[in-house]
Image (cartoon, helix red, strand yellow):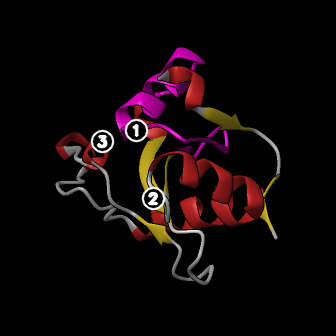
Amino acid sequence: MEQDIVVIRDRVTKNKIEELSKKRFGDMVKGVVDIEKKILALGGELHADEEQVLLDQGSLQNNLWGINIYHALPREEWIEFDSMINIRPSQDNRSRSVENESIRRKITEIVNGMITD
């Protein structure tokens, strides 16, 4: 399972995102973003799998947020901030969504900066 997960530390093409999504869900790929290290884990069946890969590589739980990327949608719509790992009452995030607008902006900047056309 872990072998399907790719950790993105530099830029990657949108074609790579499409390849990853076709391996599992077709129109989207699950991802976990480390908003401090500015890295992204993609391709797992569950956000928790990607989260664990990043934790094993030294990321801190508080910095990890789960998303879905729908590669066929326009960039301003392609990120869905929805994951079970986002439920964190201790960080005032009580739903599957990323409720903090500042964190959402960081995630969007990281994702859009790492994925090129």
In the rendered image, the residue lying farthest to the top is 56
Segment colored magenta: 32-60
Kind of residue indicated by mark 3: Ile
- State yes or no: residue 43 in magenta: yes
Residue 45 badge? 1
Q: Position of residue 59 (x, y in %)?
A: 54, 26
> In the image, what residue occupies the spot 59% across and 69% down?
71
CA neighbours of label 2 inside 10 A, class few (<14), some (14 to 19), many (20+) = some
Query: Alpha-carbon distance for marks 3 and 1?
Result: 13 Å
Q: Secondary structure at mark 1?
A: loop
Tell me which numbered mark, 2 or 3, is placed earlier along the sequence. Answer: 2
> In the image, what residue occupies the spot 36% across and 33% down?
48
Contact (Cβ within 8 Å) of mark 3 with mark 1: no
> In the image, what residue occupies the spot 31% across and 65% down?
99
Q: Is residue 105 above or below residue 5?
A: below
Instruction: Give residue 111's quadrant in the image.
Output: bottom right
Q: Which residue is mark 3?
A: 85
Q: Which residue is mark 2?
A: 68
Q: Secondary structure at mark 3?
A: helix
Residue 95 badge? none
Query: Alpha-carbon distance for marks 1 and 2?
Result: 11 Å
Q: Nearer the viewer, residue 24 or 17?
A: 24
Q: Position of residue 19 (x, y in %)?
A: 67, 52
Query: Alpha-carbon distance for marks 2 and 3?
Result: 12 Å
Give left or right: position of 75 versus 13.
Answer: left
Kind of residue indicated by mark 1: Glu
